[in-house]
Amino acid sequence: MLVYGNYPNVRLRRNRSSEFIRDIVAENHLHVHDLVYPVFILDGKNRVEPILSMPGQSRISIDKLLETAKECQNLGIRAIALFPVIETSKDLESVHESYNSDGLVQNAIQELKANFPDLGVFTDVALDPYTYNGHDGITDIQDYVLNDVTNELLVKQALSHAAAGADFVCPSDMMDGRIGAIRTALENDGYHNTGIIAYSVKYASHLYGPFRDAVGAKKGLGKSGKTSYQLNPANSNEAFHETAHDLAEGADIIMVKPGSIYLDILYRIKHEFKKPTAIYHVSGEYAMLKLAADHGYLDYSGILLESMLSFKRAGADMIWTYAALDVAKLLNN
């Protein structure tokens, strides 16, 4: 039970009176090693394509990715997450490219591990960069994603990433049973130490627009949306069911996505399951901060650190953010 004293004997402002005491009694701390930097990659060499809807972010070729990895290493960021931008010339409808051993993601993993063996490499396991309509799986004629058929392809994709050297495969598709199927396949093929970060709580949010623009999935998706497999923003108990299933099926780390407007979910998930938990500060959240700051409405550095601390306060162990480089520079300074 909390016991309260009386003013003036109790002056709560004493512990706020100087910088050193504020730091000492701070209940939560943000560190560079909390950060994961999501990066968009594409084929070719010496390619840097700015993403207009995400100021400061670009689609980059693997040679440029290595430069980014070096910067991350210098700043103390310990992990990168890879998201491919697949050219329209690829065989999109068959999605064979998603598990091509000589594919874009697979080559990127190998190059990163060859040059930066201590840098964590996380890979997105989903079919939306490879499908013609931008959905996370194979659809029927009504544009409904077929769960079990999609899972078969996700398993192949995850195995190809593990074979290339990924530290964690990260299924973001929200298909039922995909964590168990991937874990079983990894075990059977000897990838016992390849981890799974499950997008266990991925809401059907309107904050993903810039990401879909970045990977070229927005145009094909149209207005159909992903509500038949991503969570309803109105629901919180459903997030518990999804998380419990993923953990039972072998997930090592769970994720809540998006971040800032789902802090209540993050808090409940962390305190209920007490498992390593990631938050994804998604493209729309990042873009809002950048654009507001560009117009002089917000102090970018201040609101960025405040946002990151809110994730830590709510229970995040790991923060995926496109602002990772900016956050790291602020913390290092």
Image: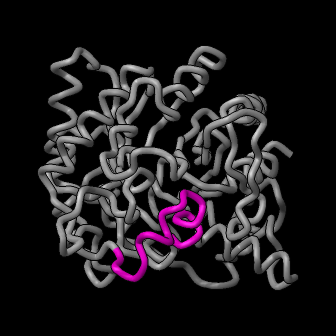
Q: Quadrant of residue 222?
A: bottom left
Q: Is residue 293 above or below residue 155?
A: below
**In the shown orientation, is residue 140 left or right of residue 13?**
left
On the image, the x and y values in percent for residue 127 come to: 35, 51
**In the shown orientation, is residue 7 left or right of residue 2?**
right
Query: Which of these two is toward me, 294 or 158?
Result: 158
Q: What residue is rendered at 26% in x and 42% in y?
A: 154
Residue 254 seen in this snapshot: no
Q: How is the image coloured?
A: one colour
Which part of the image, by quadrant, shows the N terminus?
bottom left
User: Count of labels shown?
Assistant: 0
Query: Which of these two is toward me, 270 or 48?
Result: 48
Query: Which of these two is toward me, 27 or 11?
Result: 27
Q: Quadrant of residue 135?
A: bottom left
On the image, the x and y values in percent for residue 92 come to: 39, 50
Q: What residue is rendered at 48% in x and 77% in y?
A: 261
| Magenta-highlighted residues | 208-225
Query: Which of these two is toward me, 257 or 269?
Result: 257
The dominant secondary structure in magenta is helix
Q: Residue furthest front?
A: 89
Q: Is residue 243 above or below residue 228?
A: above
On the image, the x and y values in percent for residue 141 come to: 18, 70
Residue 43 seen in this snapshot: yes
**In the shown orientation, is residue 109 left or right of residue 225?**
right
Q: Is residue 230 above or below residue 120?
A: below
Q: What residue is rendered at 62% in x and 38% in y?
A: 43
Q: What residue is rendered at 28% in x and 72% in y?
A: 231
On the image, the x and y values in percent for residue 304 come to: 71, 65
Quick check: is 216 in the magenta stretch?
yes
Quick check: is 40 in the magenta stretch?
no
